[in-house]
Image (tube, helix red, strand yellow):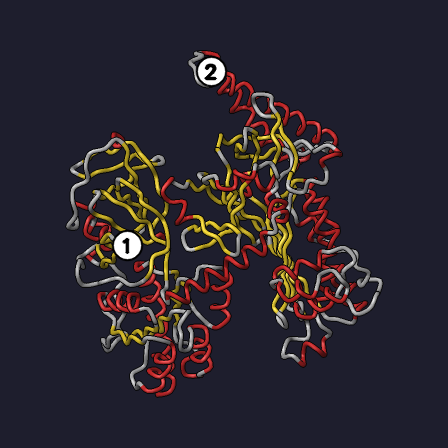
Amino acid sequence: ETAATPAAETSIRVSVQVLDRLMNLAGELVLARNQLLQGTSGAEHGALGAAVSRVSQVTTELQEAIMQTRLQVIGTVFNRFPRVVRDLSAALGKQCQLVLEGQEVELDKSILEAISDPLTHLVRNAVDHGIEPPEERVARGKPACGTILLRAFHQGGKVHLAISDDGRGIDVARLREKAAALGLISPDQARAWSDRDVLQLIFRPGFSTAEKVTDVSGRGVGMDVVKTNIERIGGSVSVETRLGQGTTIHVTLPLTLAILPSLIVRCHGRRFAIPQASISELVRIRPGETGAKIQRVKQAEVLRLRDMLLPLVRLEMALGIAQPEDETAAVRNVVVLETGQLRYGLAVQRLDDSEEIVVKPLGRHMKQCGHLAGATILGDGSVALILDAAGIAARCQLGAVQAESMKAESHAAQDTGEETQPVLFFRNDPQEQFAVPMHAVARLERIAAAQVDSVGGQRVLQYRGGTLPLVCLEDHIRARPMPECDRLYVVVCRAGGRQFGLLIREVVDIRPFGARVDTSLFREPGVIGSAVIDGQVTRMLDLFELISQARPDWFPQGASVAPAPASDGGSQATVLLAEDSDFFRTRLTEIFEQAGYRVVACPDGAAAWAAISETQTPFDCLVTDLEMPELDGFELTRKVRAEPALAGLPIVAVTSLASQSDEQRAAEAGVDEYHVKLDAERLLACVATLVQRWRKQRAGAETSLRQ
């Protein structure tokens, strides 16, 4: 009994009203802290400055502690749904199973209470509208029991919920016809709208796809309420569907509603706050870059950001405060925002600072302003309006602009016929330009030249509590020496299981780079080849080769790559390569041959399938691109997996497609490993492991046959 007493006293019951009051007081304390910090900045205040810093630190810790007291696991809401699914399935004569993931994810109590009813409606919708009757599922080749997945996870500072089913999906063509018949959209709009725009109609009040009205559905009340309730708490909801395969509803929620880290921006002398959870990145456009960075697609402005075209909105135009002549004003600062499945750029006149803000509700006369999420009091006592990323996107109808941007981007890619990858361009000398693939870059840091130390004849940087080895190009390849300067950049990379930094002087740009590279003229260890970019010869670097030279001690026994495994008989491992890009095919062949593999290189999937069918020598691994003109990588993988003798052949996708949906499609087709171009070290390690496992499996099968 004595031992049980302390455990019983570790928790107490606290009224929710007390927690709400604590949260409100913490919010006011944050406002007072911001005013103190602003009042003591810009001058030396001695002991007062130190005291203010301490107050700021304690305020932050107190705010985090109070927020922790309000957090609850989302499992408390999820756990009611198995019974909901079971009862509704029985009532409708369907067979459904519910799979729950991420029940340990925590959310503010007020948000949990607000999403309980919307989630219930979405789950019931999945059973009623999504999952087919058992006999219909069996006729379509599906298991009789349908699956509904309810998943919660953290991403980008927000909580994401996904409600998925493997049912019939939404027939967008039928949705289009019904919306036109009900007069929700005109016949011209029905023909012109994209599938994404048409899907948003399910959130319109009074609209339903049900054939008849029941006590479960058909009244046209539900999805509009779901959207309203989720957006009321600062969230967003979107839908994606594949006919005959299923539907997924994506819900994005803030972690808390009370205190938000935000970026303060200016527009026509007024200040606005943008919650940092909605911000993807900040882009600065130099005076001479406007023409290249900002273009027009069907009279709408778009921002060219690396390998993407993003819809661009000028804040003054979105708020209706711009003068007509301001439309021609040059754009200098762009905040890239992300809401649901949409990314777009918001052009602002000036960036002020980041600040933690306390959200205050808008007055009754401003409740209808969907592009505003609330207001806040800044450190100097002035009021700033809080911008709503989803509201601005809806107000400016950016969904249609994004669809046109994607079309233009896709046509541009088809016109060039080139595969691209994002690349960092930089110079150490005005007459020499270099390029590094972004997949190899972990971070880009700006430092003072004085921070670089020399220890034992090697350059190092004191970095994040440790020591980062530094590499200079002129020490390892034919390059001009870097002139002395006060500020430098460090490209932080990873090789051999360790981090190192490449010292550079000037960052030129980060943008897509075509695959046409001359691999003969400037080829040397550390340099893949060269290409002419904007009238200047640019050398493409291989950072793995570079660090192999600079730090050979990082690679035991002098091996800079994972060697090709050999069987007991010592036969050479053979890789079948399917790649339509001449550059990547040459580069991959070189990488595998240096590691000791025999390579059969094919220009597309059809040639690779012919090699499999005609060659007597068994292959140890198939390495394939996914986008190819003749038999793409997805279909090639399916054909290989359909052959019983090749069912276990290792298949590795090496592609420029980096989205999660592409990776999932590849896995469903039968790909073992998915690699975004082109991390040679990781690729070789993966292939060596797969080949070794495949050879053991094949040797075991041959031994069994002999016995």
x and y percent of residue 451 in the render? 27, 31
Quadrant of the rendered structure where residue 378 is? Answer: top right
Q: Is residue 322 above or below residue 667?
A: above
Quadrant of the rendered structure where residue 34 is? Answer: top right
Q: Looking at this view, is 79 or 219 the one in front?
A: 219
Instruction: Please give left or right for residue 686 compared with residue 62 in the image.
Output: left
Instruction: Please give left or right for residue 88 compared with residue 266 in the image.
Output: right
Give the quadrant of the N terminus: top right
Looking at the rendered structure, the secondary structure element under dot 2 is helix
x and y percent of residue 281 in the render? 47, 43
Instruction: Please give left or right for residue 128 compared with residue 148 in the image.
Output: right
Crowd class of label 2 (few under 14; some 14 to 19; many from 20; radius 10 Å) = some
Quadrant of the rendered structure where residue 216 is? Answer: bottom right
Q: Is residue 555 visible?
A: no
Q: Residue at x 61, y 46 (%)?
A: 390
Q: Residue at x 53, y 50 (%)?
A: 343
Crowd class of label 1 (few under 14; some 14 to 19; many from 20; radius 10 Å) = few
Type of the residue with mark 2 = Gly
Give the quadrant of the C terminus: bottom left
Residue at the spot of label 1? 533
Q: Looking at this view, is 88 or 635 the one in front?
A: 635
Instruction: Please give left or right for residue 516 compared with residue 524 in the image.
Output: right
Looking at the rendered structure, the secondary structure element under dot 1 is strand
Residue 49 has which mark? 2
Q: Looking at this view, is 17 or 438 the one in front?
A: 438
Type of the residue with mark 1 = Ile
x and y percent of residue 673 in the render? 41, 65
Q: Is residue 664 above or below residue 703?
A: above
Q: Is residue 705 visible?
A: yes
Q: Residue at x 50, y 20 (%)?
A: 54
